[in-house]
Image (cartoon, grey):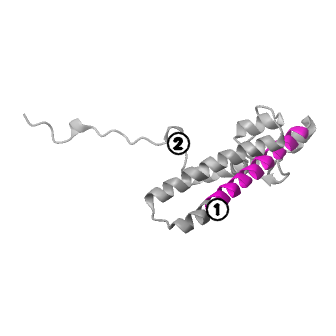
Amino acid sequence: MSVVGRHAGQSAGRLKLTTAVVAAYVMNNYVRPREIVTLIGAVHEALDQIGREELITQDDAASEKAQALSTMPTPEQIRRSITPDALISFINGKRYKTLKRHLTERGLTFAAYRALYGLPADYPKTAANYSIRRAAIARTHKFVPRHSRVTKQAPIANRAAGRGRRS
């Protein structure tokens, strides 16, 4: 399909949407006849602006994905991206203690990130020292699951040695 044909199809769809929005608005609100032209223009411009923003977003996402695919890391780069204190992102080259927020901001899951860059299944989600520090904090604040805590059991009191039963 040519560029002109694609834009004509988008324009026709936008005109139908403009008509539907204006018709719904006019049915539920009083509008002076001379203001209808202004309303149609405003709605059409707003929808046109939304369409332009969507195209820009789609183009940015497509170029980012194409750039990522063209720069697949080598095994050596993958090894160097894992340091004790941080993980180096293949998206922007910055250092992160954990990749979760960084990937979520870009609409990726960890599995998708791993697949996108061809990372091994054992690629860490957090830096090693960060994980150790968080575990130590959890232990000192007793945020450890109950089944893994070592607790002293109180001796069971001998109830028979008490007052005895009443019959």
Q: Amino acid at mark 2?
A: Pro
Quarter of the figure with residue 167: top left
Instruction: Tell me how far mark 2 sits from mark 1, CA to CA.
Output: 62 Å
Q: Amino acid at mark 1?
A: Gly
**Kind of element beneath mark 1:** helix
User: Can residue 145 be seen here?
Assistant: yes
Please tell me the numbered disc located at residue 28: none
Foreground label between 2 and 1: 1
Image location of residue 70, percent across then percent down: 90, 39
Q: In the image, is residue 116 above or below residue 138?
A: above
Query: Quick one: which residue is furthest to the front in this view?
Result: 33
In magenta stretch: residue 62: yes
Q: In the image, is residue 163 above or below residue 19?
A: above
Left or right, 46 with respect to 57, comes to left
Image location of residue 159, percent across then percent down: 24, 38
Tell me whether circle 2 and circle 1 mark residues in contact (CB < 8 Å).
no
Residue stretch rendered in magenta on the structure: 42-71
Image location of residue 87, percent across then percent down: 80, 48
**Kind of element beneath mark 2:** loop
Residue placed under numbered mark 1 in the picture: 41
Q: Main secondary structure of the magenta part?
A: helix
Left or right, 81 with respect to 30, comes to right
Residue placed under numbered mark 2 in the picture: 145
Q: In the image, is residue 11 above or below residue 33?
A: above
